[in-house]
Amino acid sequence: MLSTLAYQLCGRERRDLEPLFSAVHRYVVVQYEPDLTIFFDVPPEVALERTASRGEKLTRFESRDSTFHERVRQGFLDYLPPPPRGVVIDASRSREAVHTDVLASVTALVGK
């Protein structure tokens, strides 16, 4: 649901649909809320550089301009559940640092 909100409402600038998404969420999705949502935050320009470096064909979302990607990023941040259910991890760092943060987040949840 979080991805749908970020891409459809924010990325495509369709916040007018927010009441519809909220209603669906309230009546259908809320019973399946995850215990933990991790958002791997990375500036759009870094994400696009990483995507380009793979040499793969871009998806329709990946080929959008940087303002679209910044709106999507902000959408994830806006709709992410508050801590401790929602965790933001700076994914512009090394894989090892990101891995350490993910393990810490999961361990904190499981350790309760």
Image: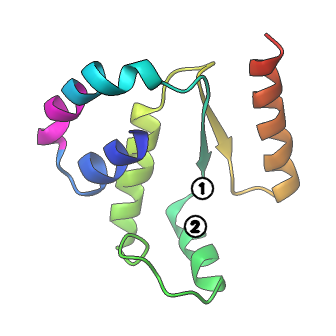
Residue 103, located in which quarter of the rendered image? Answer: top right
**In the rendered image, which residue does mark 1 sit on?**
42
Which residue is nearer to you in this view: 19 or 26? 26
Within-10-Å neighbours for mark 1: few <14, some 14–19, many 20+ = some
Q: What residue range appears in magenta? A: 15-22
Q: Quadrant of the N terminus?
A: top left
Q: What is the x, y in percent for residue 99?
A: 83, 47
> Residue drawn at (65%, 83%), measured in percent from left and top?
54
Could you tell me the amino acid type at mark 2? Ala
- Residue 19 among magenta residues: yes
Q: What is the x, y in percent for residue 28?
A: 30, 25
Could you tell me the amino acid type at mark 1? Val
Q: What is the x, y in percent for residue 70?
A: 41, 57
Which residue is nearer to you in this view: 2 or 28? 28
Circle 2 SS class: helix
- Left or right for 43, reference 1: right
Which residue is nearer to you in this view: 24 or 77? 24
- Residue 28 among magenta residues: no
Q: Is 84 located above or below residue 5 in the figure?
A: above
Q: Which mark is residue 93?
A: none
Residue 83, located in which quarter of the rendered image? Answer: top right
**In the rendered image, which residue does mark 2 sit on?**
47
Dominant secondary structure of the magenta stretch?
helix
- Which residue is at the far top? 112
